[in-house]
Amino acid sequence: MPRGALPTTRPPARPVLALALCLLALPVLAADMPDWWPAQMVMPEDSQIDDVREIGSRIRMLAFRTDQDAETLLKDWADRLEAAGYTVDWNPSNHGQPSFEFEGEAVLNGQAVSTRCHEACVTRLQVDMTLE
Protein backbone atom coordinates (compact mmCIF):
# COMPACT_ATOMS: atom_id res chain seq x y z
CA MET A 1 0.00 0.00 0.00
CA PRO A 2 1.47 3.39 -0.94
CA ARG A 3 2.41 5.72 1.84
CA GLY A 4 -0.47 7.94 2.92
CA ALA A 5 -3.11 5.85 1.18
CA LEU A 6 -6.13 4.94 3.19
CA PRO A 7 -6.91 1.25 3.47
CA THR A 8 -10.02 0.21 1.63
CA THR A 9 -12.49 -1.59 3.79
CA ARG A 10 -15.38 -3.80 2.95
CA PRO A 11 -18.61 -3.56 4.89
CA PRO A 12 -18.71 -6.15 7.64
CA ALA A 13 -20.37 -9.46 6.79
CA ARG A 14 -21.96 -9.70 10.20
CA PRO A 15 -25.39 -8.25 9.21
CA VAL A 16 -25.66 -10.82 6.43
CA LEU A 17 -24.63 -13.61 8.80
CA ALA A 18 -27.11 -12.41 11.42
CA LEU A 19 -29.92 -12.35 8.85
CA ALA A 20 -29.04 -15.87 7.70
CA LEU A 21 -29.05 -17.17 11.28
CA CYS A 22 -32.42 -15.52 11.97
CA LEU A 23 -33.93 -17.13 8.89
CA LEU A 24 -32.66 -20.53 10.00
CA ALA A 25 -34.32 -20.09 13.39
CA LEU A 26 -37.80 -19.43 11.98
CA PRO A 27 -40.45 -22.00 12.91
CA VAL A 28 -41.04 -24.72 10.36
CA LEU A 29 -44.37 -24.56 8.58
CA ALA A 30 -45.99 -27.62 7.04
CA ALA A 31 -45.62 -26.03 3.61
CA ASP A 32 -41.85 -25.83 4.19
CA MET A 33 -41.43 -29.56 4.80
CA PRO A 34 -39.79 -31.71 2.12
CA ASP A 35 -42.24 -33.54 -0.16
CA TRP A 36 -40.99 -36.92 1.12
CA TRP A 37 -41.96 -36.13 4.74
CA PRO A 38 -45.03 -38.16 5.87
CA ALA A 39 -47.97 -35.80 6.43
CA GLN A 40 -48.90 -37.78 9.56
CA MET A 41 -45.70 -36.61 11.28
CA VAL A 42 -46.90 -33.11 12.14
CA MET A 43 -44.04 -30.86 13.22
CA PRO A 44 -44.41 -28.83 16.42
CA GLU A 45 -44.89 -25.10 15.88
CA ASP A 46 -41.60 -24.29 17.61
CA SER A 47 -39.52 -26.71 15.50
CA GLN A 48 -36.14 -25.55 14.32
CA ILE A 49 -34.62 -27.75 11.63
CA ASP A 50 -30.93 -28.43 12.14
CA ASP A 51 -30.26 -30.63 9.13
CA VAL A 52 -32.02 -32.05 6.06
CA ARG A 53 -30.25 -34.54 3.83
CA GLU A 54 -31.19 -36.35 0.68
CA ILE A 55 -28.59 -39.01 -0.06
CA GLY A 56 -28.99 -40.55 -3.47
CA SER A 57 -32.50 -41.20 -4.69
CA ARG A 58 -33.81 -43.07 -1.65
CA ILE A 59 -32.19 -42.11 1.68
CA ARG A 60 -33.58 -39.13 3.59
CA MET A 61 -32.73 -37.59 6.98
CA LEU A 62 -34.15 -34.68 8.94
CA ALA A 63 -33.00 -33.47 12.38
CA PHE A 64 -34.71 -30.75 14.41
CA ARG A 65 -35.09 -29.22 17.86
CA THR A 66 -38.23 -28.45 19.82
CA ASP A 67 -39.27 -27.65 23.38
CA GLN A 68 -41.94 -30.38 23.25
CA ASP A 69 -41.50 -33.61 25.15
CA ALA A 70 -39.90 -36.22 22.86
CA GLU A 71 -41.91 -39.18 24.12
CA THR A 72 -45.23 -37.36 23.74
CA LEU A 73 -44.38 -36.18 20.22
CA LEU A 74 -43.14 -39.60 19.09
CA LYS A 75 -46.25 -41.29 20.53
CA ASP A 76 -48.47 -38.85 18.61
CA TRP A 77 -46.55 -39.52 15.39
CA ALA A 78 -46.68 -43.31 15.89
CA ASP A 79 -50.45 -43.20 16.51
CA ARG A 80 -51.02 -41.09 13.39
CA LEU A 81 -48.82 -43.33 11.25
CA GLU A 82 -50.57 -46.50 12.47
CA ALA A 83 -53.98 -44.93 11.78
CA ALA A 84 -52.81 -44.27 8.20
CA GLY A 85 -51.81 -47.91 7.71
CA TYR A 86 -48.10 -47.75 8.53
CA THR A 87 -46.45 -50.50 10.57
CA VAL A 88 -44.83 -49.05 13.72
CA ASP A 89 -42.48 -50.85 16.13
CA TRP A 90 -41.19 -49.15 19.28
CA ASN A 91 -37.44 -49.56 19.70
CA PRO A 92 -36.40 -50.00 23.35
CA SER A 93 -32.69 -50.28 22.47
CA ASN A 94 -32.02 -46.56 21.97
CA HIS A 95 -30.11 -46.11 25.25
CA GLY A 96 -33.28 -45.30 27.15
CA GLN A 97 -34.37 -42.59 24.70
CA PRO A 98 -37.76 -42.96 22.97
CA SER A 99 -37.66 -44.14 19.35
CA PHE A 100 -39.65 -46.18 16.86
CA GLU A 101 -39.26 -47.77 13.45
CA PHE A 102 -41.92 -47.48 10.77
CA GLU A 103 -42.77 -48.52 7.22
CA GLY A 104 -45.63 -47.89 4.86
CA GLU A 105 -46.79 -45.97 1.79
CA ALA A 106 -43.57 -44.80 0.06
CA VAL A 107 -41.34 -45.51 3.09
CA LEU A 108 -39.50 -48.83 2.84
CA ASN A 109 -38.20 -48.32 6.39
CA GLY A 110 -37.74 -45.40 8.71
CA GLN A 111 -36.74 -44.55 12.24
CA ALA A 112 -37.65 -41.63 14.51
CA VAL A 113 -35.15 -41.18 17.32
CA SER A 114 -34.85 -38.81 20.26
CA THR A 115 -31.31 -37.88 21.20
CA ARG A 116 -30.15 -36.98 24.68
CA CYS A 117 -31.05 -33.64 26.21
CA HIS A 118 -28.47 -30.97 25.33
CA GLU A 119 -28.19 -27.17 25.30
CA ALA A 120 -30.63 -26.10 27.99
CA CYS A 121 -32.49 -29.41 27.70
CA VAL A 122 -34.00 -28.82 24.26
CA THR A 123 -35.47 -31.96 22.66
CA ARG A 124 -33.62 -33.04 19.53
CA LEU A 125 -35.14 -35.60 17.18
CA GLN A 126 -33.83 -37.24 14.06
CA VAL A 127 -35.84 -39.09 11.45
CA ASP A 128 -34.13 -41.34 8.89
CA MET A 129 -35.97 -42.98 6.00
CA THR A 130 -35.29 -45.21 3.04
CA LEU A 131 -37.88 -44.55 0.36
CA GLU A 132 -39.21 -47.23 -1.98
Image (cartoon, helix red, strand yellow):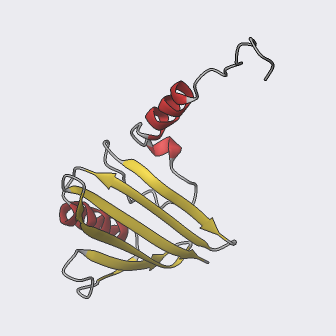
Q: Residue at x 47, y 37 (%)?
A: 21
Q: Of all residues shown, which one is farthest toward the bottom? A: 93
Q: Residue 22: x percent and y percent?
A: 44, 33
Q: Residue at x 47, y 40 (%)?
A: 24
Using residue 22 as the reference point, say whether residue 46 is left or right of it.
Answer: left
Q: Residue 33: x percent and y percent?
A: 51, 50
Q: Quadrant of residue 96?
A: bottom left
Q: Of all residues shown, which one is farthest toward the front? A: 3
Q: Quadrant of residue 115?
A: bottom left
Observer-nearest of 57 and 108: 57
Q: Residue at x 41, y 39 (%)?
A: 25
Using residue 109 as the reference point, say whether residue 99 is left or right of it.
Answer: left
Observer-nearest of 84 and 54: 54
Q: Is residue 59 above or below residue 34?
A: below
> Which quadrant would the C terminus be assigned to in this image?
bottom right
Q: Residue 27: x percent and y percent?
A: 39, 39
Using residue 57 as the reference point, say whether residue 96 is left or right of it.
Answer: left
Using residue 11 as the reference point, say whether residue 84 is left or right of it.
Answer: left
Q: Is residue 43 above or below residue 5?
A: below
Q: Residue 62: x percent and y percent?
A: 47, 62
Q: Quadrant of residue 59?
A: bottom right
> Which quadrant would the N terminus be assigned to in this image?
top right
The count of marks equals 0
Q: Is residue 76 above or below residue 14?
A: below
